[in-house]
């Protein structure tokens, strides 16, 4: 291991696969959170499998990147969003005692996210035997990005049938069925979405958002103001503006995330004392990511300037509003213990 600064180290001589042992050892030695930053999703999954081999008891969370391009017209996959929000909710609500590894990618780390305070406050708790306000729960589910469905199938779905409410919350192993007796929660249990059979009774359910865009009245007002400041007046030819103004979800609205929040954070802000382990070739991957973001922005901006695209013109926000540049990310990591993996560097000692 070669010391490159008081808190930044180069770790050499560990081939891919065995580097999971180093990660597990770092978590054991530090007795806290270790953030592993893979260069891509393939490496993240490989690290997950390797950690399972070296230390099956090690608690592991993952924070995947969106599965869409920067400045895309589509939203991230619902399952991806659920996994992201589940991890953020766990970190935001604290209670972490002992070792923990969080797996992420460079693409995910360089994208800004809602603050821990916002995620922690955007929750709903229901306990069996206690009063529950059905209309408030319904409004919470819509505001937090849940989708009303006839049958609950995937994370983010909810269904209401009389006194029965089915909810598939992010981070939960199965959907939960709430049985109401009047305005009291009479029972709660997990169930299999395919067979609809009950699996396990529970005493309490905690709900987190399923989208990083939270369509509260405050967020909608903030979006409208920011959008007009950035792009001028918006009319009926702007489906995004019209949908959000009406409190409706719109495909791709997450790409205007900064307009909905009073400031954004990074994943590092959720774990200020964590050790950071950077995958081999991270610097090259980081530069490539930033170049991709700038290229996508340039393409969208050119189309907006020239109005070359038929139909609704895409109005992109500046890259630094949603993404961290290489310099910005490196500055954020200065307060962390950082291990840079390089299997071809000479091992110390």
Image (cartoon, rainbow, N blue to C red):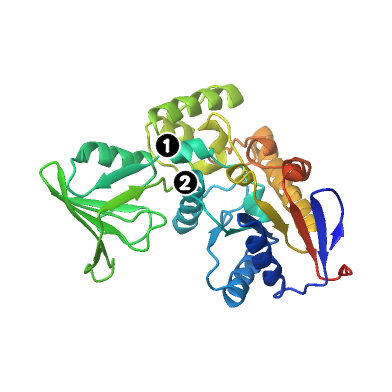
Q: Position of residue 302 (x, y in %)?
A: 70, 38
Tell me whether circle 1 and circle 2 mark residues in contact (CB < 8 Å). no
Q: Is residue 120 left or right of residue 167?
A: right
Taking the spot 81% from the left edge, 56% from the top edge, the residue there is 9
Q: Earlier in the sequence, mark 1 or mark 2?
A: 1
- Residue that badge 1 annotates: 121
Mark-to-mark CA distance, 1 and 2: 25 Å
Q: Is residue 281 left or right of residue 264?
A: right
Taking the image as drawn, is residue 78 in sight? yes
Taking the image as drawn, is residue 148 in sight? no
Taking the spot 31% from the left edge, 44% from the top edge, the residue there is 125
Q: Is residue 29 left or right of residue 140?
A: right
**Quick check: 120 above or below 79?**
above
* Residue lying furthest bottom: 53
* Residue lying furthest left: 182
**Quick check: 112 above or below 103?**
above
User: Residue 198, labelled with which disc?
Assistant: none
Q: Nearer the viewer, residue 172 or 21?
A: 21
User: Residue 251, labelled with which disc?
Assistant: 2
Taking the spot 42% from the left edge, 57% from the top edge, the residue there is 171
Q: Quadrant of residue 313?
A: top right
- Label 1 SS: helix
Q: If the image is split into quadrants, where does the C terminus sit?
A: bottom right
């Amino acid at each position: 291991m070669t010391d490159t600064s008081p808190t930044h180290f180069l770790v050499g001589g560990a081939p891919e696969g065995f580097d999971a042992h180093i990660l597990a050892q770092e978590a054991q030695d530090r007795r806290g959170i270790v953030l592993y930053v893979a260069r891509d999703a393939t490496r993240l999954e490989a690290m997950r499998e390797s950690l399972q081999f070296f230390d099956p008891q090690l608690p592991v969370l993952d924070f995947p990147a969106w599965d869409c391009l920067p400045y895309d017209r589509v939203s991230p996959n619902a399952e991806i969003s659920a996994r992201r929000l589940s991890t953020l909710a766990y970190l935001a609500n604290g209670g972490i005692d002992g070792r923990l590894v969080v797996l992420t990618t460079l693409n995910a780390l360089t994208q800004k996210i809602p603050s821990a305070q916002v995620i922690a406050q955007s929750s709903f708790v229901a306990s069996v035997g206690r009063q529950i306000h059905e209309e408030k729960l319904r409004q919470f589910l819509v505001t937090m990005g849940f989708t009303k469905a006839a049958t609950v199938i995937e994370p983010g779905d909810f269904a209401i049938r009389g006194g029965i409410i089915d909810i598939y919350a992010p981070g939960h192993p199965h959907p939960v069925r709430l049985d109401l007796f009047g305005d009291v929660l009479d029972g709660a249990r997990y169930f299999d979405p395919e067979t609809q059979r009950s699996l396990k009774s529970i005493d309490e359910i905690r709900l987190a958002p399923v989208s990083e865009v939270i369509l509260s009245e405050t967020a909608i007002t903030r979006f409208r103001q920011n959008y007009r400041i950035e792009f001028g007046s918006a009319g009926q030819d702007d489906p995004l503006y019209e949908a959000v103004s009406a409190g409706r979800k719109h495909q791709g609205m997450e790409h205007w995330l900064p307009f909905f929040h009073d400031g954004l954070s990074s994943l590092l802000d959720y774990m200020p004392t964590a050790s950071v382990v950077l995958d081999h070739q991270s610097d090259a991957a980081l530069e490539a990511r930033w170049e991709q973001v700038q290229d996508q922005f340039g393409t969208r901006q050119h189309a907006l300037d020239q109005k070359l695209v038929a139909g609704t013109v895409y109005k992109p926000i500046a890259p630094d509003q949603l993404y961290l540049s290489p310099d910005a990310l490196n500055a954020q990591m200065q307060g962390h213990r950082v291990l840079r993996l390089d299997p071809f560097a000479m091992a110390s000692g």
